[in-house]
Image (tube, grey):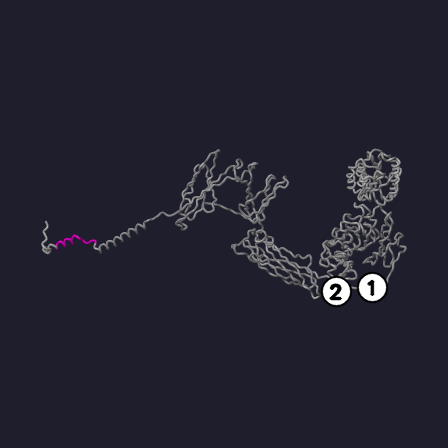
């Protein structure tokens, strides 16, 4: 970008009668600026020299030139005087080793030093030490009467050399405001002595006392006594560091005249050499080093770096020095920072009135960077806020951040002006510029963009050395452009279009149902993700997004998921101006353990601009929220009125003795129960406090979902605190127990027949989950070593078993016995760690079966026996078992008698 400039001077201004006589060698025109309303020109010359003792200081003057080329009055109208503000105290050695002639020479030396300083800026005090210390004149009465006669009338004390006592007395009694010592001026103590001190070991502590008050100490040793190392050490201890700058040694009191000028020169130190910050402040400030106009309440004012104070004239202006600031916060400023090298008036909200004054200090040194810019707000006419905001660049040892300033138009579409700051020495002299965005009433101290010269074009040197004060559209894209100067090259930078994207998520259904009959079937929901893009120009962009369901819970405790073990949904979409939406389906546990706390769903996206026809990629507005959270809550059942009115009752008791026996009791247990007899209660908490002598150990959940946290006493005085939260809403729960029957059959034949021997009181209770049980409570007194026996007996019925279709069954009959006692009176003692009496339990296995019936067996056996007998009889008959052998024998015998001779004459029977 080049401009043609005619190399001929249109108008020349020279020194005339309007310029005061003191304005010699002023370099008029080194700083110039113009009033954008009146077209007047402000010309300044900041190099007017003035000799002040051993140094030359520079000041400046400015003139306003109207349209007729007439000079206005000089600002300021007079040159500054040399200033040497200091409070100087003399401490003279009045011991016996000093002759009266030498003491007189010391007083003469004091007079000569006092005469070398102007009385209007410098105050003096005089004290003498020997075995004691005497203060002759304080700061507020030194010049009362004839001060020279007062000094001459001081009498020598004589005695020992107690130097440490003298220093401590002057520091504590002379350098005080009640005695005329002034704050924020140099404090000087001059000690003159001729011999070694009797308090050598106390000198370091006395010097430290003076150092604590920022008192600069000069030590003058007179005589040959200070040739030995011990005496030299004393002078070095008394004097400030470095000792070579604050110690004088002369052979005799006659030589004091020779060091008078050297001492005065060291007291009148060059700016910035005193570590206490009380050296010269404004003497090196050059008025008119830089200047800028600003507007306020419709009238134009001019701002000139001058003396750090407001100067009132026909045209009121406010001032700052280029090297230091007297009335600002000194802790924020640094000598040599070149404060005011660039001054810029900024109209932040574009309402034609100046809101901020920007003042650069490009030479400000920090441990890791160089340069800064102060942002001052205008609270009222010519009243600067002296707690300025500070802008800093990147961490570069050499940067000269603030070498150029330029107010830019609104770059990020927030209707506030922005700021460009040059740092031409960064990156080994390649340079860079920084962009800062405006905020409500100020500038955001964090830069939004850093443009390095190496990124713009290779070979650039000192990029950011100058920045154009106007940002016109030079590229024809209706966007502001920026011209930045470097060595031998001017670069034109184009601004990108800015787009704003708002992300939103809606759910269908909008609430998670809590009345679910089937807890095994998850609920289905749909998340609609929308991206709305707004811009002054037509742009497109690619969006990469990630939706995380129930993001505040860790896996696998999440209650919502896209698929099994997956609760994130990622994707990308291309969007244009307007609203762009997409749907994501997911599932929710039907009956989650936590149905109170809503699901916090996280949506995160990244932006990637698509280049336009002019090769410009849009940028995302820095105010855009790329990470958003979208809750999805549960239905809350609070009746028709939508308001939950609970009725919570709290019960608290100790499960052991309410008294703690030291050395015996190890644990103190408390049982807390909460009951709600009203509508659902949400976010209910129970808070228990306990004395500092107790420490929390653990909690046990007996019923419900409860989470407890505890904090013991930290200092032994405050009470410990345990806080328990009921995670889910709880409502009224009524539980009643009665004798349980199945049809018309009783488990117990007669509930009244349950008896316990030696029972004194019987109180039936309910508490069994399946069948009715009876609880016997026997109250009695048992002496030491005594035993008691209780026998429980009852009859059982099996009719209830037959009713459910079973002919036989086995079950357990359980009996338990526990010991109760007055825990407020007795303590259960056990050799183990258990502090509660044991509970004994007896289980008896009962088998129920029907009585045996043998009728069928008898009848069947009888009939079977008869059938067997018949079969046996028939068989025998068939076999001839029932035929008579006697008949056969008769028949056989008859056959034998009919033929007797057949056998040859057998003899006849006898």
Q: What number is the disc on residue 340? A: none
Q: What element carries label 1?
A: loop
Q: What number is the disc on residue 5? A: 1
Q: Is residue 517 above or below residue 781?
A: below
The total number of labels drawn is 2
Q: Where is residue 892 in the image (x, y as percent from the top left)?
A: 14, 54
Q: What stretch is highlighted in magenta?
A: 881-895
Q: What element carries label 2?
A: loop
In the rendered image, which quarter is residue 354 located in? Answer: bottom right
Q: How far apart are marks 1 and 2 (CA)?
A: 22 Å
Q: Mark 2 points at which residue?
A: 475
Question: What quarter of the picture does the N terminus occupy?
Answer: bottom right
Few, some or many residues within 10 Å of mark 2 (<14, 14–19, 20+): few
Q: Which residue is drawn at 42% across and 42% down?
A: 751
Q: Position of residue 605 (x, y in %)?
A: 64, 58
Q: Are marks 1 and 2 in contact (CB under 8 Å)?
A: no
Nearest to the eye among marks 1 and 2: give it: 1
Q: Is residue 153 magenta?
A: no
* Furthest-right residue in this view: 17
* Residue 721 seen anywhere in this rendered image of the structure: yes
Q: Is residue 429 above or below residue 134?
A: below
Q: Main secondary structure of the magenta part?
A: helix
Q: Position of residue 385 (x, y in %)?
A: 77, 50
In the rendered image, which quarter is residue 185 located in? Answer: top right
């Amino acid at each position: 970008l080049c401009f043609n400039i005619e190399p001929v001077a249109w108008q020349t201004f020279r020194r005339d009668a309007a310029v005061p006589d003191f304005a010699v060698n002023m370099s008029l025109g080194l700083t110039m600026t113009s009033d954008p309303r009146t077209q007047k020109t402000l010309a300044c010359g900041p190099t007017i020299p003035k000799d002040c003792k051993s140094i030359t200081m520079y000041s400046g003057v400015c003139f306003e030139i109207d349209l007729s080329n007439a000079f206005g009055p000089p600002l300021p109208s007079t040159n500054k005087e040399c200033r040497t503000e200091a409070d100087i105290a003399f401490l003279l050695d009045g011991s016996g080793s000093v002759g009266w002639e030498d003491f007189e020479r010391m007083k003469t030396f004091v007079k000569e030093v006092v005469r070398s300083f102007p009385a209007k800026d410098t105050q003096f005090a005089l004290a003498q030490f020997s075995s004691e210390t005497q203060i002759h004149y304080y700061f507020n009465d030194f010049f009362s009467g004839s001060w020279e006669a007062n000094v001459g009338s001081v009498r020598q004390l004589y005695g020992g050399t107690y130097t440490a006592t003298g220093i401590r007395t002057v520091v504590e009694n002379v350098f005080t405001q009640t005695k005329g010592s002034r704050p924020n001026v140099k404090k000087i103590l001059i000690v003159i002595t001729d011999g070694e001190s009797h308090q050598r070991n106390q000198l370091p502590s006395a010097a430290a006392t003076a150092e604590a008050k920022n008192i600069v100490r000069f030590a003058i040793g007179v005589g040959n006594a200070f040739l030995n190392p011990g005496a030299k050490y004393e002078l070095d201890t008394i004097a400030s560091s470095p000792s070579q700058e604050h110690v004088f040694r002369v052979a005799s009191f006659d030589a004091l005249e020779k060091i008078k000028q050297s001492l005065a020169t060291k007291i009148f130190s060059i700016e910035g050499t005193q570590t206490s910050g009380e050296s010269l402040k404004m003497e090196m400030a050059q008025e008119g080093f830089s200047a800028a106009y600003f507007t306020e309440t419709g009238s134009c004012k001019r701002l000139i770096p001058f003396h750090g104070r407001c100067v009132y004239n026909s045209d009121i202006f406010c001032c700052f020095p280029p090297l230091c600031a007297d009335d600002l916060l000194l802790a924020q400023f640094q000598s040599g920072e070149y404060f005011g090298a660039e001054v810029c008036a900024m109209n932040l909200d574009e309402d034609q009135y100046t809101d901020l004054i920007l003042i650069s200090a490009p030479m400000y040194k920090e441990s890791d960077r160089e340069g800064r810019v102060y942002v001052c707000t205008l609270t009222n006419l010519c009243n600067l806020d002296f707690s300025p905001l500070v802008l800093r660049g990147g961490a570069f040892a050499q940067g000269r951040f603030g070498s150029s300033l330029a107010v830019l138009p609104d770059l990020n579409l927030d209707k506030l002006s922005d700021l460009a700051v040059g740092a031409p020495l960064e990156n080994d002299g390649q340079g860079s510029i920084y962009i800062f965005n405006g905020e409500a009433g100020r500038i955001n101290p964090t830069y939004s963009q850093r443009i390095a010269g190496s990124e713009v074009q290779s070979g650039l040197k000192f990029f950011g050395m100058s920045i154009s004060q106007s940002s016109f559209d030079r590229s024809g894209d209706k966007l502001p452009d920026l011209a930045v100067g470097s060595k031998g090259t001017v670069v034109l930078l184009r601004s990108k279009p800015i787009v704003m994207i708002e992300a939103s998520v809606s759910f269908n259904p909008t609430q998670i149902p809590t009345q679910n009959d089937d807890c095994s079937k998850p609920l289905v929901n749909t998340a609609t993700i929308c991206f709305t893009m707004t811009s002054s120009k037509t742009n497109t962009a690619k969006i990469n997004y990630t939706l995380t369901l129930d993001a505040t819970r860790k896996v696998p405790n999440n209650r919502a998921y896209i698929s099994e073990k997956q609760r994130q949904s990622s994707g990308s979409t291309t969007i244009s101006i307007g609203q762009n939406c997409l749907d994501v389906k997911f599932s929710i546990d039907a009956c989650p353990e936590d149905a109170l706390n809503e699901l916090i769903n996280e949506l995160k996206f990244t932006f990637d601009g698509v280049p336009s026809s002019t090769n410009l990629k849009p940028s995302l507005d820095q105010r855009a929220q790329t990470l958003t959270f979208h809750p999805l809550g549960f239905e809350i059942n609070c009746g028709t009125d939508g308001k939950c009115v609970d009725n919570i009752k709290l019960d608290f008791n100790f499960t052991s003795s309410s008294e703690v026996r030291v050395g015996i009791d190890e644990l103190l247990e408390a049982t807390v129960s909460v009951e709600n007899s009203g509508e659902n209660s949400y976010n209910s908490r129970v808070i228990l406090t306990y004395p500092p002598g107790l420490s929390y150990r653990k909690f046990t959940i007996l019923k419900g979902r409860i989470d407890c946290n505890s904090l013991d006493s930290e200092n032994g005085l405050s009470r410990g605190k345990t806080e328990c939260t009921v995670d889910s809403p709880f409502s009224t729960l009524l539980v009643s127990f009665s004798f349980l029957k199945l049809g018309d059959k009783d488990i117990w034949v007669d509930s009244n027949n349950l008896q316990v021997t030696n029972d004194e009181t019987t109180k039936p209770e309910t508490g069994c989950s399946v069948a009715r049980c009876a609880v016997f409570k026997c109250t009695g007194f048992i002496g030491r070593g005594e035993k008691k026996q209780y026998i429980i007996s009852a009859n059982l019925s099996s009719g209830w078993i037959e009713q459910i279709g079973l002919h036989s069954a086995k079950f357990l009959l359980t009996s338990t016995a526990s010991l109760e006692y007055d825990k407020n009176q007795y303590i259960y003692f056990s050799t183990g760690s258990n502090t509660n009496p044991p509970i004994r339990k007896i289980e008896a296995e009962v088998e129920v079966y029907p009585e045996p019936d043998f009728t069928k067996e008898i009848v069947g056996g009888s009939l079977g026996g008869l059938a067997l007998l018949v079969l046996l009889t028939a068989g025998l008959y068939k076999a001839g078992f029932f035929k008579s052998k006697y008949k056969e024998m008769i028949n056989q015998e008859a056959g034998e008698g009919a033929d007797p001779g057949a056998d040859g004459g057998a003899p006849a029977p006898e």
